[in-house]
Amino acid sequence: MILKPMMREGIIPLPVAFISTISKDGVRNIAPYACVMPVLRPLDLICIASAFKRDTLVNIRETGQFVINMVGADFSDKVIPTARFSPPEADEFELAKLNEKSSETVRPPGIAGGYAWMECELFKLYEETQYVLVMGRVLRLEVDDAVLNAQGEFDVTKARPLMMAGTRKGMDFCTVAGIDHFEPFSAMFADGRDPLENKYQE
Ligand SMILES: Cc1cc2nc3c(=O)[nH]c(=O)nc-3n(C[C@H](O)[C@H](O)[C@H](O)COP(=O)(O)O)c2cc1C
Protein backbone atom coordinates (compact mmCIF):
# COMPACT_ATOMS: atom_id res chain seq x y z
CA MET A 1 0.00 0.00 0.00
CA ILE A 2 1.37 3.43 -0.89
CA LEU A 3 0.55 6.17 1.59
CA LYS A 4 0.58 9.92 1.06
CA PRO A 5 3.96 11.38 2.12
CA MET A 6 2.16 13.36 4.86
CA MET A 7 1.19 10.09 6.59
CA ARG A 8 4.63 9.74 8.21
CA GLU A 9 3.12 9.44 11.68
CA GLY A 10 0.98 6.56 10.42
CA ILE A 11 4.08 4.39 10.36
CA ILE A 12 6.18 5.94 13.16
CA PRO A 13 4.62 5.54 16.60
CA LEU A 14 5.21 8.86 18.35
CA PRO A 15 5.54 9.64 22.05
CA VAL A 16 2.70 11.73 23.46
CA ALA A 17 4.38 14.16 25.86
CA PHE A 18 2.52 16.83 27.82
CA ILE A 19 4.23 20.22 27.83
CA SER A 20 3.55 22.43 30.81
CA THR A 21 4.29 26.15 30.72
CA ILE A 22 3.26 29.34 32.54
CA SER A 23 2.27 32.54 30.81
CA LYS A 24 4.00 35.80 31.72
CA ASP A 25 0.86 36.58 33.78
CA GLY A 26 1.17 33.31 35.70
CA VAL A 27 -1.53 31.21 33.97
CA ARG A 28 -0.71 27.48 33.89
CA ASN A 29 -0.93 25.75 30.51
CA ILE A 30 -0.70 22.14 29.31
CA ALA A 31 -0.66 20.79 25.75
CA PRO A 32 0.07 17.34 24.31
CA TYR A 33 2.94 17.32 21.81
CA ALA A 34 3.91 14.27 19.74
CA CYS A 35 6.68 15.90 17.69
CA VAL A 36 9.35 15.58 20.37
CA MET A 37 12.91 14.47 19.62
CA PRO A 38 16.14 14.31 21.66
CA VAL A 39 19.02 15.79 19.65
CA LEU A 40 21.87 13.24 19.43
CA ARG A 41 23.68 11.30 22.13
CA PRO A 42 25.10 12.56 24.59
CA LEU A 43 23.76 16.12 24.29
CA ASP A 44 21.22 17.59 26.70
CA LEU A 45 19.14 19.22 23.92
CA ILE A 46 15.57 18.30 23.00
CA CYS A 47 13.59 19.57 20.03
CA ILE A 48 9.83 20.00 19.70
CA ALA A 49 8.00 21.02 16.54
CA SER A 50 5.26 23.56 17.16
CA ALA A 51 2.61 25.26 15.11
CA PHE A 52 2.43 29.04 15.56
CA LYS A 53 -1.05 29.19 17.14
CA ARG A 54 -0.06 27.60 20.42
CA ASP A 55 -0.20 29.16 23.88
CA THR A 56 2.65 26.77 24.64
CA LEU A 57 4.84 28.52 22.05
CA VAL A 58 3.83 32.00 23.26
CA ASN A 59 4.69 31.02 26.83
CA ILE A 60 8.04 29.49 25.87
CA ARG A 61 8.95 32.61 23.88
CA GLU A 62 7.96 34.91 26.74
CA THR A 63 9.34 33.00 29.71
CA GLY A 64 12.05 30.80 28.14
CA GLN A 65 10.97 27.82 30.25
CA PHE A 66 8.92 24.63 29.91
CA VAL A 67 8.55 21.13 31.31
CA ILE A 68 8.22 18.06 29.10
CA ASN A 69 6.15 15.56 31.08
CA MET A 70 6.34 11.92 30.02
CA VAL A 71 3.20 10.01 30.94
CA GLY A 72 1.87 6.47 30.91
CA ALA A 73 -0.99 5.04 28.87
CA ASP A 74 -3.35 5.87 31.76
CA PHE A 75 -3.12 9.54 30.68
CA SER A 76 -4.84 8.88 27.34
CA ASP A 77 -8.07 10.42 28.65
CA LYS A 78 -6.18 13.68 29.41
CA VAL A 79 -5.13 14.20 25.78
CA ILE A 80 -8.32 15.67 24.38
CA PRO A 81 -9.12 17.95 27.37
CA THR A 82 -5.65 19.53 27.03
CA ALA A 83 -5.61 19.52 23.20
CA ARG A 84 -8.95 21.29 22.73
CA PHE A 85 -8.78 25.01 22.18
CA SER A 86 -9.00 26.97 25.40
CA PRO A 87 -8.35 30.68 25.81
CA PRO A 88 -4.91 31.74 27.12
CA GLU A 89 -6.44 32.82 30.43
CA ALA A 90 -7.78 29.29 31.17
CA ASP A 91 -5.84 27.26 33.73
CA GLU A 92 -5.39 23.91 31.98
CA PHE A 93 -4.33 22.06 35.15
CA GLU A 94 -7.80 22.84 36.53
CA LEU A 95 -9.51 22.21 33.21
CA ALA A 96 -8.00 18.72 32.84
CA LYS A 97 -8.16 18.01 36.59
CA LEU A 98 -4.40 17.46 36.82
CA ASN A 99 -2.22 18.21 39.83
CA GLU A 100 1.12 20.00 39.94
CA LYS A 101 4.46 18.44 40.68
CA SER A 102 6.70 21.32 41.66
CA SER A 103 9.80 21.94 39.54
CA GLU A 104 13.28 22.62 40.95
CA THR A 105 14.95 24.69 38.22
CA VAL A 106 12.12 26.37 36.28
CA ARG A 107 8.89 28.17 37.20
CA PRO A 108 6.39 26.00 35.28
CA PRO A 109 5.30 23.04 37.39
CA GLY A 110 5.38 19.49 36.12
CA ILE A 111 2.34 17.20 36.11
CA ALA A 112 1.87 14.80 39.03
CA GLY A 113 1.30 11.20 37.97
CA GLY A 114 3.66 11.33 34.99
CA TYR A 115 6.65 8.96 35.00
CA ALA A 116 9.39 11.46 34.02
CA TRP A 117 9.91 15.20 33.88
CA MET A 118 12.35 17.26 31.82
CA GLU A 119 12.73 20.81 33.12
CA CYS A 120 13.90 22.82 30.11
CA GLU A 121 15.15 26.28 29.22
CA LEU A 122 14.75 27.65 25.71
CA PHE A 123 18.00 27.19 23.77
CA LYS A 124 17.01 28.34 20.26
CA LEU A 125 13.99 28.77 17.97
CA TYR A 126 14.21 27.82 14.30
CA GLU A 127 11.32 29.52 12.55
CA GLU A 128 9.88 28.58 9.16
CA THR A 129 6.62 29.78 7.63
CA GLN A 130 4.54 26.79 8.78
CA TYR A 131 6.29 25.68 11.95
CA VAL A 132 8.80 26.48 14.64
CA LEU A 133 11.41 24.07 15.94
CA VAL A 134 11.86 24.78 19.62
CA MET A 135 15.19 23.63 20.92
CA GLY A 136 15.32 23.24 24.69
CA ARG A 137 18.18 22.47 27.04
CA VAL A 138 17.25 19.95 29.71
CA LEU A 139 18.28 21.45 33.04
CA ARG A 140 16.91 18.68 35.23
CA LEU A 141 15.66 15.22 34.34
CA GLU A 142 13.78 13.16 36.89
CA VAL A 143 12.26 9.72 36.51
CA ASP A 144 9.88 8.05 38.95
CA ASP A 145 11.68 5.17 40.72
CA ALA A 146 8.52 3.10 40.24
CA VAL A 147 9.33 2.68 36.50
CA LEU A 148 12.90 1.42 37.06
CA ASN A 149 13.94 -2.24 37.12
CA ALA A 150 16.11 -3.89 39.80
CA GLN A 151 19.27 -2.55 38.07
CA GLY A 152 17.91 1.00 38.16
CA GLU A 153 17.27 1.13 34.41
CA PHE A 154 14.10 2.41 32.73
CA ASP A 155 11.55 -0.39 32.30
CA VAL A 156 9.05 0.23 29.50
CA THR A 157 6.70 -2.46 30.79
CA LYS A 158 6.39 -0.52 34.06
CA ALA A 159 6.15 2.93 32.48
CA ARG A 160 3.84 1.96 29.59
CA PRO A 161 4.70 5.25 27.77
CA LEU A 162 1.73 6.88 26.07
CA MET A 163 2.26 6.87 22.32
CA MET A 164 0.17 7.25 19.20
CA ALA A 165 0.06 6.17 15.59
CA GLY A 166 -1.75 8.53 13.23
CA THR A 167 -4.36 6.87 11.05
CA ARG A 168 -6.37 8.47 8.26
CA LYS A 169 -9.23 8.90 10.74
CA GLY A 170 -7.38 9.97 13.84
CA MET A 171 -5.03 9.01 16.63
CA ASP A 172 -4.57 5.39 17.60
CA PHE A 173 -3.10 5.50 21.12
CA CYS A 174 -0.68 2.73 22.00
CA THR A 175 2.36 1.88 24.07
CA VAL A 176 5.61 -0.07 23.58
CA ALA A 177 6.81 -3.49 24.69
CA GLY A 178 10.33 -4.79 25.30
CA ILE A 179 11.61 -7.61 23.06
CA ASP A 180 14.33 -8.97 25.40
CA HIS A 181 17.17 -7.86 23.14
CA PHE A 182 19.87 -5.65 24.62
CA GLU A 183 23.10 -4.39 23.00
CA PRO A 184 25.66 -2.08 24.62
CA PHE A 185 26.52 1.11 22.69
CA SER A 186 30.06 -0.28 22.36
CA ALA A 187 28.75 -2.99 19.97
CA MET A 188 28.51 -0.29 17.26
CA PHE A 189 32.26 0.36 17.28
CA ALA A 190 34.95 -1.77 15.61
CA ASP A 191 37.22 -1.62 18.68
CA GLY A 192 34.33 -2.52 21.01
CA ARG A 193 34.70 0.76 22.93
CA ASP A 194 32.01 3.41 23.20
CA PRO A 195 33.83 6.79 22.81
CA LEU A 196 31.10 8.40 24.91
CA GLU A 197 31.30 5.84 27.70
CA ASN A 198 32.70 8.25 30.31
CA LYS A 199 29.67 10.55 29.84
CA TYR A 200 27.38 7.87 31.26
CA GLN A 201 29.33 7.31 34.47
CA GLU A 202 27.55 8.44 37.67
C1 LIG B 1 -1.71 13.55 20.46
C2 LIG B 1 -1.50 15.00 20.07
C3 LIG B 1 -0.23 15.43 19.70
C4 LIG B 1 -0.01 16.76 19.32
N1 LIG B 1 1.24 17.14 18.96
C5 LIG B 1 1.49 18.43 18.61
C6 LIG B 1 2.81 18.84 18.25
O1 LIG B 1 3.77 18.06 18.26
N2 LIG B 1 2.99 20.14 17.91
C7 LIG B 1 1.97 21.05 17.91
O2 LIG B 1 2.19 22.22 17.59
N3 LIG B 1 0.70 20.68 18.26
C8 LIG B 1 0.44 19.40 18.62
N4 LIG B 1 -0.82 19.02 19.00
C9 LIG B 1 -1.89 20.02 19.06
C10 LIG B 1 -1.88 20.80 20.40
O3 LIG B 1 -1.78 19.93 21.51
C11 LIG B 1 -3.19 21.59 20.53
O4 LIG B 1 -3.32 22.49 19.45
C12 LIG B 1 -3.31 22.32 21.85
O5 LIG B 1 -4.60 22.90 21.98
C13 LIG B 1 -2.30 23.43 21.99
O6 LIG B 1 -2.52 24.00 23.25
P1 LIG B 1 -1.96 25.41 23.66
O7 LIG B 1 -2.57 26.45 22.73
O8 LIG B 1 -2.42 25.57 25.08
O9 LIG B 1 -0.48 25.36 23.53
C14 LIG B 1 -1.07 17.70 19.34
C15 LIG B 1 -2.36 17.25 19.70
C16 LIG B 1 -2.57 15.93 20.05
C17 LIG B 1 -3.94 15.48 20.43
Image (tube, grey):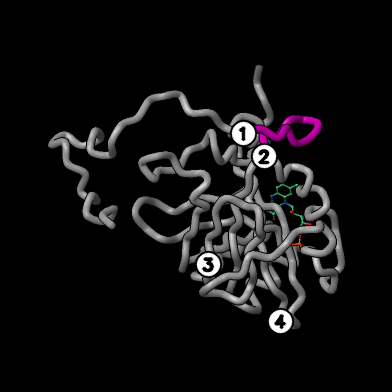
**Does the residue tagged 4 have its C-beta within 8 Å of any atom of ligand 1?**
no
- The residue positioned 74% from the left and 71% from the top of the image is 28
Please report whichever mark, 2 or 4, sits nearer to the chain's N-terminal start: 4
Q: Name the residue carrying label 3.
A: 120
Relative to residue 171, is residue 18 depicted above or below? below
**Which amino acid does the dot numbered 3 rest on?**
Cys
**Which amino acid does the dot numbered 4 rest on?**
Lys
> Where residue 159 sits: x, y (%)?
56, 41
Give the spatial CA distance, label 4 vs label 3: 16 Å
Relative to residue 40, is residue 100 depicted above or below? below
Give the spatial CA distance, label 1 vs label 2: 7 Å
- Classify mark 3: helix, strand or loop: strand
Circle 4 packing at 10 Å, graded few (<14), some (14-19), many (20+), is few
Name the dominant secondary structure of the magenta segment. strand
- The residue positioned 77% from the left and 75% from the top of the image is 27
Give the spatial CA distance, label 3 vs label 1: 25 Å
CB within 8 Å, label 3 to label 1? no
Magenta span of residues: 164-174
- Classify mark 4: helix, strand or loop: loop
Circle 2 packing at 10 Å, graded few (<14), some (14-19), many (20+), is some
Residue 24 — which label? Answer: 4
Is residue 166 within the magenta segment? yes
CB within 8 Å, label 4 to label 3? no
Give the spatial CA distance, label 1 vs label 4: 35 Å
Q: Name the residue carrying label 2.
A: 73
